[in-house]
Image (cartoon, helix red, strand yellow):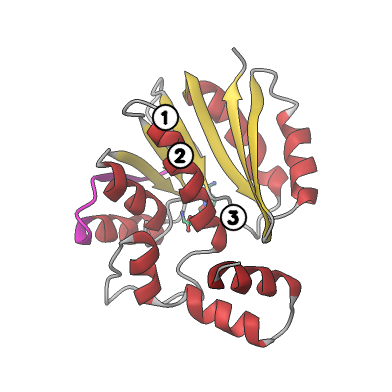
Amino acid sequence: MNPLQWLFSSYHRSSGSSLPRRIYQAYLRSPGLVRWHFGMRLHSECPVPQFYYNVATILMRWVLVDRIERLKQPRMLEIGVGAYALLAGALYQGFRLPIDCCDNEEWAVEWAKRHAELNECQLNVFYSDLFSGVEEGKRYDLIFWNTPYHIPNRRFLPGLFAGAVKHLANRGELVICYKTATNRAETLEILSDYPNLEVREIEKWWWNPIEVLIIGRKL
Ligand SMILES: C[S@@+](CC[C@H](N)C(=O)[O-])C[C@H]1O[C@@H](n2cnc3c(N)ncnc32)[C@H](O)[C@@H]1O
């Protein structure tokens, strides 16, 4: 087990203000570690959050790097880019491919634009509540979202799946994540209402309960 895996697995097994939890929180708030993980510099004027990212951001990145390597110049959309644009920024730096990015928080959109500029990343950042701001008829090979933790799945998954049916290219993929197996059951149940979509893969890691789900159009 490497130190990162130890930290994350201890975090998930402990509670309150235990030492692993405190180290974990400090880890996710460190600008130096943001730079190390994602290659992104943070704006000195940007408000400091409780966390700059979460473990899911790292796991999503691992999965997406693998998918992008297999696809030829994929057209990509990130939903929920967040103020620091870390996931899209890291992917841009790895592949030098432009990425459309949106968020439904105006302040996050403004800061994401500033972080893209600061780090010279070609990210097209715009306001959108799910797909509301996405050009009609525009198709993507890869749509991804590190989904929010504190909003019930049923509030956003139906809109996400309905939008994916419209905006995924024929062989396109939707990549999302959830925190626990309980969420997996609910996610798959909601997905079953969209007969044009199917699960392609579920990625899991032994050292934490997050899972990444890859969904495709039924061919
Ligand atoms: C867990 S954060 C992910 C931030 C960043 N992309 C990352 O991976 O660390 C989820 C993001 O989704 C955004 N979000 C929530 N609901 C949304 C919606 N309906 N449409 C677009 N973005 C949304 C939030 O504002 C937040 O920035």
Distance of label 2 from label 1 (alpha carbons) = 7 Å
Residue labelled 3 has its Cβ within 8 Å of some atom of ligand 1? yes
**202 or 163, which is in the foreground?**
202
**For residue 91, side relative to residue 29 (left or right):** left
Q: Earlier in the sequence, mark 3 or mark 1?
A: 1
Quadrant of the image containing the C terminus: top right
The amino acid type found where label 3 is placed reads Pro
Q: Are marks 2 and 3 in contact (CB under 8 Å)?
A: no
* Residue ID at (69%, 56%): 206
The mark closer to the camera, 2 or 3, is 2
| Quadrant of the frame with the N terminus | bottom right
Q: Please state the extent of the stretch shown in magenta in the rendering.
A: 117-129
Of residue 146 and residue 104, the one placed in the foreground of this image is 146
Q: Which residue is mark 3?
A: 148
**Mark 3, residues whose alpha carbon is within 10 Å: few (<14), some, or many (≥20)?**
few
Query: In the image, what residue type sits under mark 1?
Result: Arg
Q: CA distance from mark 3 to mark 1?
A: 27 Å
Q: Residues within 10 Å of mark 2 (few under 14, many from 20)?
A: few
For mark 1, what is the residue? Answer: 70
The picture places residue 181, in percent across and down from the top left corner, at 77, 49
* Figure check: 33 above or below 166: below
- Residue 65 seen in the figure: yes
Q: Is residue 141 above or below residue 89?
A: above
